[in-house]
Each structure stands twice: as structure tokens, then as C-alpha cells.
Image (tube, rainbow, N blue to C red):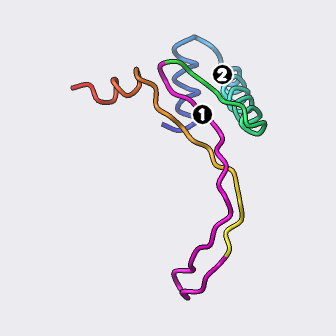
Amino acid sequence: MNKAELTKALAEKFELSISKTSEIVSCTLELITKALEKSEMIQLIGFGSFSVKKRKARNGRNPKTGETIKIPASKTIKFSVGKALKEAVNKK
């Protein structure tokens, strides 16, 4: 499912216009992004949690040339699956 399909499904479920629903979805994603930019944790009970983790600088290897390269420190986003989502996916 992509953003357009999600917007359409929500619009149908809540009997809203596609444009209004699109605005809501975009705003929700913007709020999540802004929170992660500030390294805040986002917890959606039953679904999962988003958090920001720091990666230390490290040495790597260019697979094409074999040359050693320095990989700078960076931040990455971690997603931990919630219990209800995990159970729904694994349901038989």
C-alpha cells in the first residue's frame, strides 16, 4: 500500500474528501518526521515505536576497489514492532 492508496482507504472509511484526507495523512507524516528530527521517540501502542539511534564513525571497504574508506557518524531510524501488530501478521 502506498500513500495514495492509504489516503483513498481512509477517505472511504471515514467518508471524507480525498483532498482533506490527503492533508491529514501528510500532516501526520510531517509531525512524525519533525519529532524524529528532534530525536524524540514515537510510540503507537499496539503498532510499534520509532526511535533515533546514533551510529559511530567506522571504517568500511569499497567492495568494487577494496579500498578502505571512512564512514562518518550518522543517525538512523529504528522501528520496533508492537505486540498487536506482530500477532496480527503471524496469525494463522
Res. 41 image quadrant = top right
Indicate which disc residue 50 carries. Answer: 1
- Residue 85 in the figure: left or right of residue 30: left
Query: What span is colored magenta in the figure?
Result: 46-69
Residue 46, image x and y in percent?
A: 47, 19
Name the kind of residue labelled 2 in the image.
Thr
The answer to whether the residues at label 1 and label 2 have Cβ atoms under 8 Å apart is: no
- Residue 80 in the figure: left or right of residue 90: right
Discs 1/2, front: 1
* Local SS, label 2: helix
Q: Residue at x 56, y 78 (%)?
A: 61
Q: How many marks?
A: 2
Residue 35, image x and y in percent?
A: 74, 31
Q: Residue at x 64, y 67 (%)?
A: 58
Q: Is residue 28 above or below residue 74?
A: above
Residue 72, image x and y in percent?
A: 71, 65
Is residue 16 covered in magenta? no
Bin the neighbour count of mark 1 within 10 Å (Cα to Cα): few under 14, some 14-19, many 20 and up. some
Q: Which residue is mark 2?
A: 21
Q: Is residue 69 above or below residue 50?
A: below
Name the kind of residue labelled 1 in the image.
Phe
